[in-house]
Amino acid sequence: MENLKKSLIYIIFFPVVIIYFESVLRISVFKTLFDVGYINIILFSVPIGLLMGLLVTNFSEKENKIVLILLLVLLSIIYIIQYIYYKIFSTFLSLYSFIGASQAMQFWEEIIRAISKDIGSFVFLCLPLALIIIFNKKIKPISIYNKKLKLKIIGIAALVQTVILLIVINSNTGELSYHYLYTESFVIDKSVSSFGLLTTERLDCKNIILTLLEDREKDNIRRHKKDTNVYAIGKSTTNTSIVEAVGSNEEIKDNQSLVNEKPEPKIEYNVMNIDFESLIENEQNEKIKNMNEYFSKIEPTKKNNYTGKFKNKNLILITAEGFSPYAIDENLTPTLYKMYEEGFKFKNFYTPLWGVSTSDGEYVACTGLIPKAGVWSMYESSKNYMPFCMGNQMRIVGYNTFAYHNHYFGYYKRDLSHPNMGYDYKGLGNGLDIKETWPESDLEMIDVTVPEYIKKQPFHIYYMTVSGHLRYTFEGNAMSNKNKDAVKDLNYSDNVKAYLAANIEFDKAMESLINLLEDAGIAEDTLIAISPDHYPYGLEIQEISELAGHEVETNFELYKGVFILWSKGIESEVIDKPCSSLDILPTLSNLMGLEYDSRLLMGRDIMSDSEPLVLFSNRSWITDKAAYNSSTGELMTKNNCTIKDGYEKEITKKVKDKFKYSTLILENDYYGLILN
């Protein structure tokens, strides 16, 4: 009986340890502990903990001890890695991204900084393992030979797992229900908060397995389509009206236009001539059929006074690493200030953070799609037909298209994704001859690359910069150190100064770019578009608040970004409409007068009269009428605006649908199925 009691202690040990780890992580990251989500976490922790406990009482005493220590080491590593990763990148590390962990290890100084900023949490996460090491000699996990007892423990684990699954699956109330998070959409931060890290890791594994299976299904669908040749696409045309392309409500109204002396002007839309009716009728795959039905009902954006405004001009599109409105200063960054003041001023532009950080930020700006959670969407898109990326769109109409990145060319597998977007791509290590530092110089990249294309008009160039990357210290950032003297007298903390100094290098790059364009006499013939990949998460919230001059609100304001749209001699305009990086591709496509189908993108042309919608990874959203905070469940109307009943539910469904169908586009190579 005494031995049985000792064995049961080790059975209970792991549920307790897992709940302990979850509690420390929860307090450290979410600054809270007790809520409904914590109850879910406790219940999810019990089954996996009991099974681990059985494992350490299943062999000889020596072997049990080894298994116990190995399991505890594994748990400690999982929680410590996720804690550190979140402290650096403001999101959790997906298992898919773990293959890039070696790339992230170059930020070891930032890892040390993250730990030092919250040393208490780190110590608490290390504590169970430390105690096991200290009391190593007293650990004697005796085996349980009673099969009935083992079956009872397994039964208890199964019962608790069944109970919590029933609770979660039937919790289908609210805009971001547990049912939705568990069964319909993988939102990693929300999942950790609602179900715990270990359950999230399990859901992440399922997500990866499904991705692999979807790749196989995608290939099968491609082969089937090729064999049956079931395509119902009409000839694409940029001048297709809604009557010709998707039908019109005008046709089912009375024939007022026949009796009017002056018929209403014909409305044109940014659509392609896709016969969705035939696609739906001939589609055998239910998933693809559902997608066809969904996109056929999306209202396209109208062409407008800005359509083709910059047609035939050169286009330089830049995703600027860690760029923010706080990096624009008349004295520190005069060129960026000039471009912002002289160009279009987007006053309510947002750059949400998605999941894989830089790669996801690029994906949104370059594709007009929302990233799929848990995978490198940009890399996954390299396997698909991506006709709406600017490189592919502009190459078709005769542009020379080049892309550059001044860090390792294969980072996040850009050597696969960027050529697939329609670019001749160079990075550090495959043709971009610049000095290797950390980070590398944007100015040097501009000076080396511009001569390659300046005489090859018309051209479209894409840059992914790196000078603004963390770590924001003068010792760990070559660009911050290079421009240190320019910020030394500013009344900011050292990390904030280092951030501004790093962005001075980007400003110098833009100054050089504009000078080279002017020297070539084509500054007025070139449109430059700049947006960030994400907010500067290398700074602590209090440091960003220091830059802002007030405490920054973290659900919306933290993601307030900047979109610079400039050409020499452009007439400055103020755009108050809420918009985001998701809207960049359709906006540029319209401005350049390119053929695209606005129904097939998740963003909208900012210049159109479409209703604005800014959405965030946690399913919060902003429109011109209201803002919904999914973390608090609060709906805030704007300017005392009166909204109709059901408005919150309507917009939230629209947001969920955008996430769902954007993921399905990526998973199924949808553009390839209906357009290629």
Image (spheres, rainbow, N blue to C red):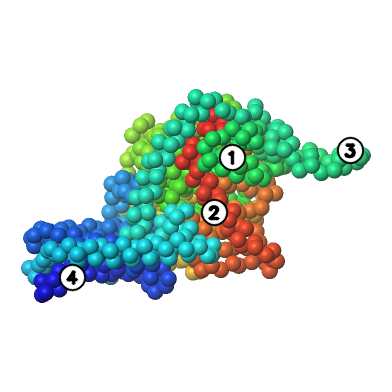
The residue furthest front is 148
Tell me how far mark 3 sits from mark 4, CA to CA. 86 Å
Tell me how far mark 4 sits from mark 1, CA to CA. 56 Å
Q: Nearer the viewer, mark 4 or mark 1?
A: 4
Q: Which mark sits nearer the N-terminus, 3 or 2?
A: 3
Q: Which mark sits nearer the N-terminus, 2 or 1?
A: 1
Q: Which mark sits nearer the N-terminus, 4 or 2?
A: 4
Residue annotated with mark 4: 8
Q: Which mark sits nearer the N-terminus, 3 or 4?
A: 4
Residue annotated with mark 2: 656
Residue 72 seen: no
Tell me how far mark 3 sits from mark 2, CA to CA. 42 Å
The label shown at residue 340 is none
> Hey, what amino acid is under mark 4?
Leu
Indicate left or right for 674 with 383 as reference.
Answer: right
- Residue 213: % across, % down: 39, 40
- Residue 119: % across, % down: 28, 68
Tell me whether the residue at label 3 lies in contact with that at label 2, contact meaning CB atoms closer than 8 angstroms: no
Residue placed at 46% from the left, 66% from the top?
A: 546
Residue placed at 67% from the left, 65% from the top?
A: 645
Residue placed at 19% from the left, 66% from the top?
A: 149
Q: Secondary structure at mark 3?
A: helix
Label 4 packing within 10 angstroms: few (<14), some (14-19), many (20+): some
Indicate left or right for 253 with 532 as reference.
Answer: right
Q: Nearer the viewer, mark 3 or mark 1?
A: 1
Residue annotated with mark 3: 258
Given residues 135 and 142, the one toward you in this image is: 142
Q: Secondary structure at mark 2?
A: helix
